[in-house]
Image (tube, helix red, strand yellow):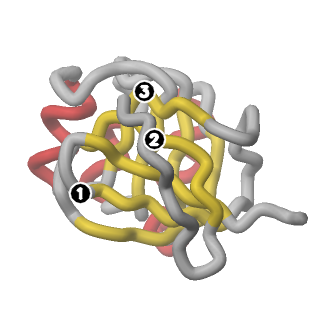
Amino acid sequence: MSNEKVNDIDGYRFIGQGYNVVTVGRKKGVALNLTNPQDMIKLMSNSEKIKDTVVVTSGGTTTFVAPILYKKPAGIITFGGTPESHLGIVGRNFRVPIVMTLTLEGCDSIPDGTPLLMECDGKLGRVYAKLPE
């Protein structure tokens, strides 16, 4: 990953970067941590919420995340996996912003409800958050 200094964007503070799956530019959404299939099923029952949700999950090989792609979430962030994984391959076809193997900087988690900005250009995807002071 790059060590270059990253500037904040429009009130969003840079919190980390990982592998970008598909070049789609900038996308805003609200973080929701999902850890199991039951969490995903609950989210999938709320079509309006999905459009504004950035799913945050531990691994890119979590196949329980893939079914939400056809409902077009605001984005997906994983702390593991690669763009060559199942989620990455399928995600490219749906053009959903996905940042994989996110390395956080200046914080150790992304709490539910955090407003996020994903910047998905080039090989690296960057994540920014509106965090309380």
* Residue at the image position 86 percent from the left and 64 percent from the top: 132
**Marks 3 and 2 in Cβ contact (< 8 Å):** no
Q: Quadrant of the C terminus?
A: bottom right
Quadrant position of residue 119: bottom left
> Which residue is the site of mark 1?
121
Q: Is residue 114 above or below residue 93?
A: below
Q: Residues within 10 Å of mark 2 (few under 14, many from 20)?
A: many
* Residue 54 visible here: yes
Label 1, secondary structure: give it: loop
* Residue at the image position 10 percent from the left and 49 percent from the top: 93
Q: Amino acid at mark 2?
A: Gln
Front position in the image: 2 or 118 = 2
Give how far apart the Cα atoms at labels 3 and 1 are: 16 Å
Quadrant position of residue 91: top left
Give how far apart the Cα atoms at labels 3 and 2 are: 8 Å
Q: Residue 46 appears at what percent x and percent y?
A: 54, 64
| Mark 3 or mark 1, earlier in chain | 3
Q: Amino acid at mark 3?
A: Thr
Q: Is residue 19 left or right of residue 39?
A: left
Quadrant position of residue 80: top left
| Mark 3 or mark 2, earlier in chain | 2
* Residue 45 visible here: no
Q: Is residue 25 left or right of residue 39?
A: left
> Which residue is the site of mark 3?
101
Front position in the image: 96 or 3 = 3
> Which residue is the site of mark 2?
17
Front position in the image: 108 or 66 = 108
Front position in the image: 130 or 112 = 130
> Across the whole image, how many numbered discs are drawn on residues?
3
Q: Residues within 10 Å of mark 1 (few under 14, many from 20)?
A: some
Q: Amino acid at mark 1?
A: Asp
Label 3, secondary structure: give it: strand
